[in-house]
Amino acid sequence: MDIDARFISQSRIKWSIIKGEDIKPCPHRLLKTRYTNDVQGLYNNSYQPISPMQIGNYFEEKILGKTAYSDEVIDLKKRPLSNKDFSEHLQEGKKYAAHERMDAHAFTFKRLCEEKEIEVLPQNVQVPIVKKLVHPYTKEVYYFKGITDLFPTTIKNTGGQKFTAIVDIKTTKDVDNTYFSIDKPMSSMACYGKMEELEKIQAHSYLWMIEDFDYRLNCIFFPEHTEIYKVVDKVIRPYADAHEVIFFYWVFGYKNDDLEANRALIPVKYDKGERALFFESVRKCLELEKEYIKNNWPKRPSANNCKGCPMNPKYKGFTDMKCKSKGTAETGAPGDCDSAYSADPHPTSNITENKLEF
């Protein structure tokens, strides 16, 4: 069946909206590096031998067998060969510390899953979910899409109590990171040590998508996952509709060699307020995208927007597609331009966002 769909996702929302607020991104940069991918090099910063995204993809492939968008075997860049390496006739350099630490986490992953009774099967790994969303005012139809790392699965807490869960794998340098600055909204993406400041739209959107699960729609979009959708529809849906499914971030860090101190299993709170924030973020994102299109994806130079931009000549991964903005990253001067979904009643969750409980 052919469906004329407008897709939206939690990732797409985070390009413009963080914690319900417009982060004032550069629409031109978003168009070239996100929406169309005309310009590459967004994550390959020259000062990092291996990027955080590469580490995350490598780890997911290592423990789950595939990443969200690829079945390819992924490896990480090694250190350059030293004179000692040459003398020992090594064919490639040694691993960076982050690489070695993520391999150590991967080695213990199966044991951790057994202890927590987390199921990792070919059928419940990287499962896509889609849900129809109708704008309450314009009546425009969108399809909200996401890919769950592990769903459905059970999970057991330290008291032996079992839950139905969605588990998302995260990698970060420091699992206890508490840094968040209002001037750097993207810092909310990795402050796992300060959950009140963490951007949680991924968790909230996935929990919303499995409510009133649309079996037929999901089978139309992703027929290869029909069997697991049957399980979700017949077994998991009652729990989801009763708001008894819990979303967990399972975070693995590579700050040092202490594996136990560098991992955390964190349940995410999902209550009436969080639900309202999610719908508000969706509404704002759609409005901003219409504004970007209307204004032909204008440039918005600023220190945050121009830093690391592949179209910025000062960026070491600079491409031939120049920004040509009148503004500069240093001054943040103006460039070429000047530039709710109502929340349903929802019971307050009794889940505490505390990694110690699990």
Image (tube, helix red, strand yellow):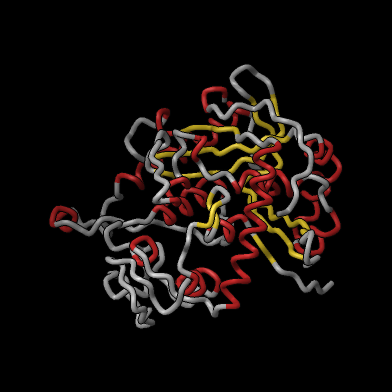
**Is 271 situated above or below 64?**
above
* Label tally: 0
Please state, as top left, top right, bottom left or bottom right, where the N terminus lies in the image: bottom right
Instruction: Work out whether 119 lies above or below 79.
Output: above
- Image x and y of residue 289, in percent: 60, 68
The answer to whether residue 43 is left or right of residue 222 is: left
Q: Is residue 130 left or right of residue 25?
A: right
Is 163 on the left or on the right of 36, as rendered?
Answer: right
Residue in the picture at 52% in, 49% down: 60
User: Is 125 placed above or below 288 here?
Assistant: above
Q: Residue at x 26, y 55 (%)?
A: 79
| Point 44% across, 51% down: residue | 186
Whether residue 221 sits left or right of residue 171 in the image: it is right
Q: Residue furthest top?
A: 159
Q: Which quadrant holds residue 175?
A: top left
Task: Give coordinates of residue 133: x percent, y percent.
Answer: 77, 58
- Quadrant in the rendering for residue 91: bottom left
Q: Is residue 223 visible?
A: no
Foreground of the two, 185 or 114? 185
Q: Position of residue 313 (x, y in %)?
A: 29, 75
| Quadrant of the snapshot with the C terminus | top right
Is residue 97 in view? yes
Q: Position of residue 123 (x, y in %)?
A: 70, 49
Residue at 61% over, 40% down: 167
